[in-house]
Amino acid sequence: MKKKVSITILIISFLTSFLLPQQSNAKEAPKPPQKVAYLTFDDGPNSSVERILSILDKYHAKATFFMLNNNMKLHQSSVKKMVANGHGVACHGVTHDKNKFYKSPKSAANEMKTCLATLKKMTKTTSVMIRVPYGSKPYMTAPYRKEMDHYGYKMWDWNVDSLDWKWLNGSKTANYTIKQIKNLQKRGISPLILFHDKPTTADGLPAVLKYLKDNGYELKPLTNTMKPYNFWDPRKI
């Protein structure tokens, strides 16, 4: 009887050693910090928007679109697709005219108010994210920023300028953008990239996305809850 009990105990011990998870004294290696990149597109939606959306989808990338009021009205289906696909949607104003937009703090805020209202009516999405024409310096002085703060708007600039508006060439745009991303990467800074809704930008976009993906970046949209980066508050992101 004792022999049978001993054999049973041995069998149970043997099975337990295989079936139950084993504790290890070795600590798990810490996960490397997540690398994030933020792609943004200004001045659209334009004729290239569907191609840009298709490329982003191919690379499983999210972006943020800072759009002009009247262009949204011309490309409503594309704007709705941005929201459906999980991209960030935001406003760039109405006129994109320096003299009209920056005529006064009130005129600047009113353009954003009009644009964001159009966006909400079109998509049922509330956004408080804005990017002012030509960037926030030097035009968005304290009175202008105070007016935007009054409405709760979050003003975004960029730390990588693709200069796609200057190059008008896909390869040059991609190479110049990747060079800047590499410089930020050495300093542990997330790239916040300025693009425009242009055909040549779409030409260069796959090369930029491939570089980012190959180097472990996750492509995320900007959101209402994030603290904005702008030239008046150029913090590390």
Image: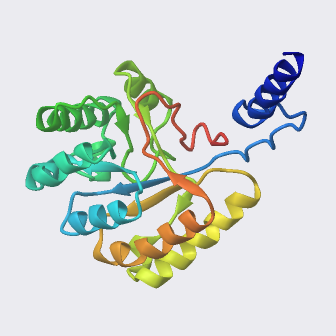
Q: Nearer the viewer, residue 84 or 73?
A: 84
User: Which residue is at 46% across, 47% downward?
Assistant: 220
Q: Is residue 13 left or right of residue 233?
A: right
Work out which residue is located at the far front of the displayed protein and give it: 1
> In the rendered image, which quarter contains the N terminus?
top right
Residue 29, by quadrant, is top right
> In the rendered image, which quarter contains the C terminus?
top right
Residue 175, by quadrant, is bottom right
User: Which residue is at 45% across, 50% downward?
Assistant: 135
Query: Is residue 93 visible in this depiction of the protein?
Result: no
Q: Position of residue 194 (x, y in %)?
A: 46, 58
Q: Is residue 237 above or below residue 56?
A: above
Q: Position of residue 24 (x, y in %)?
A: 85, 34
Work out which residue is located at the far top of the displayed protein and give it: 1
Residue 106, by quadrant, is top left
Q: Is residue 169 left or right of residue 13?
A: left
Q: Nearer the viewer, residue 33 or 227?
A: 33
Q: Position of residue 27 (x, y in %)?
A: 86, 37
Q: Is residue 84 left or right of residue 176?
A: left
Q: Position of residue 140 (x, y in %)?
A: 45, 39
Q: Nearer the viewer, residue 40 or 132?
A: 40
User: Which residue is at 47% across, 70% downward?
Assistant: 163
Q: Is residue 89 above or below residue 2?
A: below
Q: Is residue 55 above or below residue 89?
A: below
